[in-house]
């Protein structure tokens, strides 16, 4: 079984999503785990290039310095070339998304 790992982070404005760089994932059968986090704001449900649906693993967790983090998964996901993962947040902030393919 192949494992692909990628990450992307940058500052962005409200309403402007953050996406990972494109990678090639397995065409079928993978499970994707995503972690989204930001300095402040509410984290939106992530999306990806292949239209997979992500379910939350946990409620958004508020960090003691004001940031937020949330974990997501999608089982039996579709994949392929040029696969990107996208997340949004409700405020102008530093914002990260991390993914793992299993």
Image (cartoon, rainbow, N blue to C red):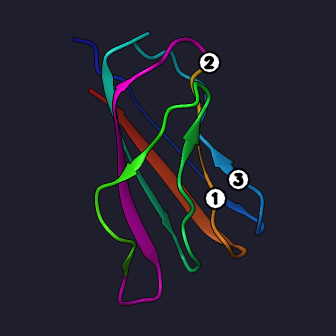
Q: For the residues labelled 3 and 1, say whether their Cβ atoms are less than 8 Å apart.
A: yes
Query: Would you place residue 74 above or below residue 17 in this image?
Result: above
Distance Cα–Cα, label 3 vs label 1: 5 Å
Residue behind mark 1: 88
Classify the position of the C terminus by image quarter: top left
Decide which of 84, 76 is in the foreground and name it. Answer: 76
Q: Secondary structure at mark 3?
A: loop
Magenta region includes residue 53: no
Distance Cα–Cα, label 3 vs label 2: 17 Å
Instruction: Give the quarter of the image for residue 68.
Output: bottom left
Task: Please provide percent x and percent y for residue 29.
Answer: 31, 16
Decide which of 52, 82 is in the foreground and name it. Answer: 52
Residue displayed at 39% across by 63% down: 70
> Which mark is first along the chain, 2 or 3?
3
Magenta region includes residue 78: yes
Distance Cα–Cα, label 1 vs label 2: 20 Å
Task: Please provide percent x and percent y for residue 86.
Answer: 60, 44
> Which mark is first along the chain, 1 or 3?
3
Residue displayed at 37% across by 82% down: 63
Query: Would you place residue 65 above or below residue 48 in this image?
Result: below
Q: Is residue 5 left or right of residue 88?
A: left
Residue displayed at 69% across by 76% down: 91
Decide which of 45, 21 is in the foreground and name it. Answer: 45
How many discs appear?
3
The circle drawn on residue 82 is 2
Residue displayed at 29% across by 21% down: 3
Q: Which residues are magenta?
A: 63-81
Query: Would you place residue 64 above or below residue 67 in this image?
Result: below
Q: Secondary structure at mark 2?
A: loop
Residue behind mark 3: 17
């Amino acid at each position: 079984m192949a494992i692909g790992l990628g990450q992307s982070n940058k500052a962005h404005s409200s309403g402007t999503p953050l996406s990972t760089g494109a990678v090639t994932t397995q065409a079928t059968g993978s499970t994707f785990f995503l972690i989204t986090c930001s300095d402040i704001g509410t984290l939106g449900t992530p999306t990806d290039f292949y239209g997979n649906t992500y379910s939350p693993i946990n409620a958004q967790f508020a960090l003691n310095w004001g940031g937020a983090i949330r974990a997501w998964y999608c089982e039996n996901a579709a994949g392929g070339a040029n696969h990107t993962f996208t997340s949004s947040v409700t405020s102008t902030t530093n914002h990260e998304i991390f993914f793992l393919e299993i």
